[in-house]
Image (cartoon, rainbow, N blue to C red):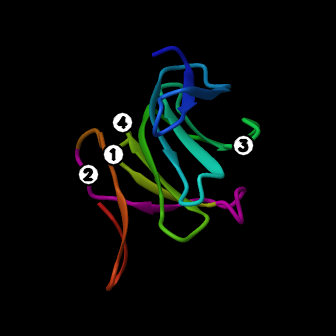
Amino acid sequence: HDKTAMLRDGETGDWIGTFEGHNGAVWWAALNEQATMAATASGDFSAKVWDATTGDERYTFVHKHIVRTIDWLPGSRHIATAGKETIVRLFDLSRPEAEPQTLLGHSALVRVLHCTDEPSGQQVL
């Protein structure tokens, strides 16, 4: 857990770049569908969104505790985060300054979440 996330080629494993900017362990990383943006979840109580082609940090979303997992909602500019706070948050990247939508109900650490695009609509699992 060295405070960075690395981007590697999916076929060869070759190093492409490193996202630097977290002050704690990076627990999770996810690319959007186009692989143009990356999102990271960290032990420094933040989630970050990066330009995957330049490595530039685009947004930081501060939380009150460790952010353990992150994912992109399919076909959208939204990310979902969760972790030690037991709250799932949905951030709209077209309005990064807006308060996130929250999903409550967990009673313990959320270790993993996954966003899907089902026939009945988008789901956060």
Q: Secondary structure at mark 3?
A: loop
Q: Residue at x 46, y 33 (%)?
A: 65
Label pair 4/1, CB-CB below 8 angstroms: yes
Residue that label 4 marks: 84
Residue toward you, 68 or 86: 68
Q: Secondary structure at mark 1?
A: loop
Q: Residue at x 31, y 44 (%)?
A: 112
Residue that label 1 marks: 86
Q: Position of residue 87 (x, y in %)?
A: 38, 50
Gap between marks 2 and 3 measured at Cα: 35 Å
Q: Secondary structure at mark 4?
A: loop
Q: Quadrant of the N terminus?
A: top left
The answer to whether 84 is drawn above or below residue 74 in the figure is: above
Query: Magenta part of the protein: which range?
Result: 93-107
Q: Residue furthest front?
A: 12
Mark positioned earlier in the residue sequence (2 or 3): 3
Mark positioned earlier in the residue sequence (2 or 1): 1
Image quadrant assignment for residue 49: top right
Label pair 2/1, CB-CB below 8 angstroms: yes
Q: Position of residue 35 (x, y in %)?
A: 59, 52
Image quadrant assignment for residue 67: top left
Q: Which mark is residue 53?
A: 3
Amino acid on which the number 2 mark rests in the picture: His
Q: Which mark is residue 106?
A: 2
Gap between marks 4 and 2 measured at Cα: 10 Å
Q: Residue furthest left?
A: 107
